[in-house]
Amino acid sequence: MSNKTRKNILNAAFLIALLAATVWMVFRGQDFGEIVSILYGVAPAFLIAGFVLVILYVCSESVIIKYLLATVHIKVPLFNCIRYSFVGFFYSCITPSATGGQPMQIYYMKKQNIDIPTATIILMLVTIEYKFVLVFIGLAVAVFGQSLVQSLSADVQFFLYLGIALNVFCVCFMSLLVFLPGTAKFLITKGFSFLKKIHLMKEKSNRTERLEKSMETYRGASNFLKENKMAIFNTTIISFIQRFFLFSITYLVYRSFGLSTESYMTVTILQSIISISVDMLPLPGGMGISEGLYKRIFTPVFGSPSLMTASMLVSRGFSYYVLVIVSSIVSLYTHFTVTDLKQNKKEKE
């Protein structure tokens, strides 16, 4: 058995175990019959609206990718960009810390004649914008929403501030790599030397070469930012809209149960707190911790454990599980339909 196969089996086993633990945590001590009865009462129109918001969420990234590619004079059909986005979301949802999404996107973009350096730079900028939006919302909540934050339990506040801190660090680190690649290279090189000195990292002959290649990518991203500031501003605005498509699903579910006490802004901010808290944690899709935080935050909002659990099944179902199912179907379709254009050209010649 190859190392890759063994790794895939372990990842699948971990995902199944995590899912089983999550299901146990969600339904522990709950009246399953009452939850089912509540779910039967949800109007189909709300379910359709939730599905539409999930699709809009994914397609918003497609618009960003197409916009940034057009900025560097690469014309790609929006349909292709939609496929890249679904592929990215699928592999991000099933891998810890969403590490699997971009490599697969780059793989399929390369098959469509988009060179790896350009694809890497574009997707890096998408990631920076995505993280920046979360940081902006998180800091805004921490500064201007203290009354709401203070109403949350101590453990929820801990995860919120941890999430903000990790995302701030990530954005600052990526910004350093992009805006000061020379300084970043010096610091990383010194860091490698220190880790080798204290025997936490082994010597590898190609590590310096790989670092050089990475720095070239960041230099390219830096040049892109300097030359296309308006494109970055516009796509960042789209990223804000994209995030609120997803956050709004919980308010939609809230209203579908006939509740109206809490405002759209309150419910949406509470949902954003969950996303910020789990975004950098090494769990596929934040599975387990997302449900735990939802339970802590939204039980008072929905008024009863059964209503809260039913709302979680619908809200989390759309924002994660439906997204995984739809994106897996699109990813499978992409795998069998995206052909290597360069290879086809050689065969015709």
Image (cartoon, grey):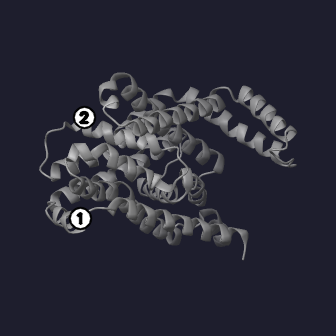
Q: Residue furthest front?
A: 29
Badge 1 density bin: few <14, some 14–19, many ≥20, Cα 10 Å: few
Q: Residue 106 location in percent, x, y?
A: 59, 54
Q: CA distance from mark 1 to mark 2?
A: 30 Å
With respect to residue 295, does 232 lie above or below? above
Circle count: 2
User: In the structure shown, which secondary structural element does the residue marked by tag 2 occupy?
Assistant: helix
- Which sits in the foreground, 33 or 122? 33
Residue 223 visible within the image: no
Indicate whether 150 appears above or below 47.
Answer: above
Indicate the amino acid at tag 2.
Answer: Met
Which residue is depicted at the point 33% across and 35% down?
152
Which residue has dot 1 on it? Answer: 31
In this rendering, would 136 be left or right of 267?
Answer: right
Q: Amino acid at mark 1?
A: Asp
Q: Residues within 10 Å of mark 2 (few under 14, many from 20)?
A: few
* SS assignment at label 1: loop
**Left-right relation of 7 to 70:** right
Q: Which image quadrant is residue 21 in?
A: bottom left
Q: Which quadrant holds the N terminus?
A: bottom right
The residue lying furthest to the top in this view is 143
Residue 224 % position (x, y): 58, 33
Compare residues 291 and 42 and report the one nearer the observer: 291
Image quarter where the C terminus lies is: bottom right
Q: Which residue is mark 2?
A: 265
**Residue at the farthest bottom position:** 1
Query: Which residue sits at x=61%, y=35%?
Result: 221
Q: Quadrant of residue 25?
A: bottom left
Residue 20 image position (x, y, % from top left): 44, 67
As drawn, the label of residue 272 is: none
Q: Residue at x 36, y 29 (%)?
A: 141
